């Protein structure tokens, strides 16, 4: 019988794995277990919790000794902006790998992370490397090894050009706030990320993007631990009329917010 070859250890001492968590402790345990199975080690693992329910906090206590993460707790839910800020503030390494707890890394993720880190170390102008998306970014310049540089101009048609920054899994410099500011803590839902997206563009952020963006990670939610972001009908409907109105609304709003610097 052919014996399985163990996955060689991949060590990233200059990278902190930052995970934001809220009421999905089983998903968090799955993410950490998968990285362990892949033989991936980081300088530190930081779990920034946003006031999860007692049963999830208990689960974090149970798995913390096994995975050795630093747990940043808060007494009550203070919103995504606060959770991201306190998590990033705790990072001590030069680079931050940000992943939400409902993602599962595939084996292909590890070499892609290593290549992204190498490129960021060699090119100080790179602010971020993105590993996942819901759709392909429309303006890309191939740079090799599966990565492309994301291109933005206000003159490019369409509104999807604005999605250069995303809260989907990415590697960034831990000095990110110095260039782009902090996440807004006075906004709810996914608005802190939207404002960061505008700031990233206004401050001429530079990012690379893995073109096979569905190969590296899988996002998995269940009925037991569903997504914690609730979107309304108008944002999700596939109705032709609703989708058309939504398209024009986003085009106008994003161009206005960018030009107004909001």
Image (cartoon, rainbow, N blue to C red):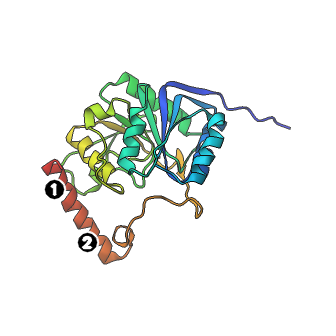
What label does residue 66 carry, if any? none
* Relative image position of residue 211 (x, y in whole percent): 43, 44
Q: Is residue 171 visible?
A: no
Q: Give neighbour class at mark 2: few <14, some 14-19, many 20+ (Cα, 10 Å).
A: few
Q: Position of residue 172 (x, y in %)?
A: 39, 34
Outermost residue, left direction?
Answer: 260
Residue placed under numbered mark 1 in the picture = 256
Q: Give the left or right position of residue 228, taking residue 148 as reference.
A: right
Q: Specify the farthest residue to the right.
A: 1
Local packing at callout 1 (Cα closer than 10 Å; few below 14, some 14-19, many 20+) is: few
Picture residue at 57% right of the left edge, 52% below the top? 54
Give me the residue at 64% from left, 41% from top.
Answer: 63
> Is 189 left, or right, of 106 in this rendering?
left
For mark 2, give the secondary structure. helix
Report x, y in % for residue 192.
Answer: 31, 50
Name which residue lies at 40% across and 38% down. Answer: 86
Indicate left or right for 75 with 249 as reference: right
Q: Nearer the viewer, mark 1 or mark 2?
A: 1
Mark 1 lies on a secondary structure that is helix
Q: Earlier in the sequence, mark 1 or mark 2?
A: 2
Between 68 and 255, which is closer to the camera in this rendering? 68
Is residue 75 found left or right of 154 in the rendered image? right
Residue topped by disc 2 = 245
Measure the alpha-carbon separation of dots 1 and 2.
16 Å
Q: Residue at x 37, y 40 (%)?
A: 85
Q: Is residue 88 above or below residue 30?
A: above
Q: Do we see residue 76 in this rendering?
A: yes
């Amino acid at each position: 019988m052919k014996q399985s070859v163990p996955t060689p250890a991949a060590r990233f001492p200059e990278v902190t794995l930052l995970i934001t968590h809220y009421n999905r402790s089983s998903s968090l345990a799955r993410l950490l277990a998968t990285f362990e199975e892949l033989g991936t080690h980081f300088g530190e693992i930081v779990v920034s919790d946003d006031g999860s329910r007692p049963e999830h906090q208990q689960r974090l206590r149970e798995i913390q000794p096994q995975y050795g993460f630093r747990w940043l707790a808060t007494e009550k839910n203070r919103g995504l902006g606060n959770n991201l800020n306190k998590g990033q503030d705790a990072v001590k390494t030069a680079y931050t790998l940000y992943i939400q707890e409902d993602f599962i890394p595939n084996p292909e993720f590890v070499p892609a992370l290593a290549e992204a880190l190498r490129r960021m170390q060699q090119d100080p102008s790179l602010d971020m490397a993105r590993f996942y998306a819901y759709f392909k970014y429309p303006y890309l310049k191939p740079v090799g090894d599966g990565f492309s540089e994301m291109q933005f101009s206000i003159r490019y048609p369409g509104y999807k050009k604005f999605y250069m920054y995303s809260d989907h899994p990415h590697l960034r410099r831990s000095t990110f706030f110095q260039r782009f500011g902090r996440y807004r803590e006075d906004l709810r839902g996914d608005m802190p990320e939207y404002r960061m997206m505008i700031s990233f563009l206004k401050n001429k952020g530079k990012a690379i993007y893995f073109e096979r963006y569905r190969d590296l990670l899988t996002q998995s939610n269940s009925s037991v631990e569903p997504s914690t972001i609730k979107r309304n009908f108008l944002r999700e409907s596939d109705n032709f009329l609703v989708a058309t109105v939504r398209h024009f609304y986003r085009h106008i709003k994003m161009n206005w917010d960018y030009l107004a610097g909001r």
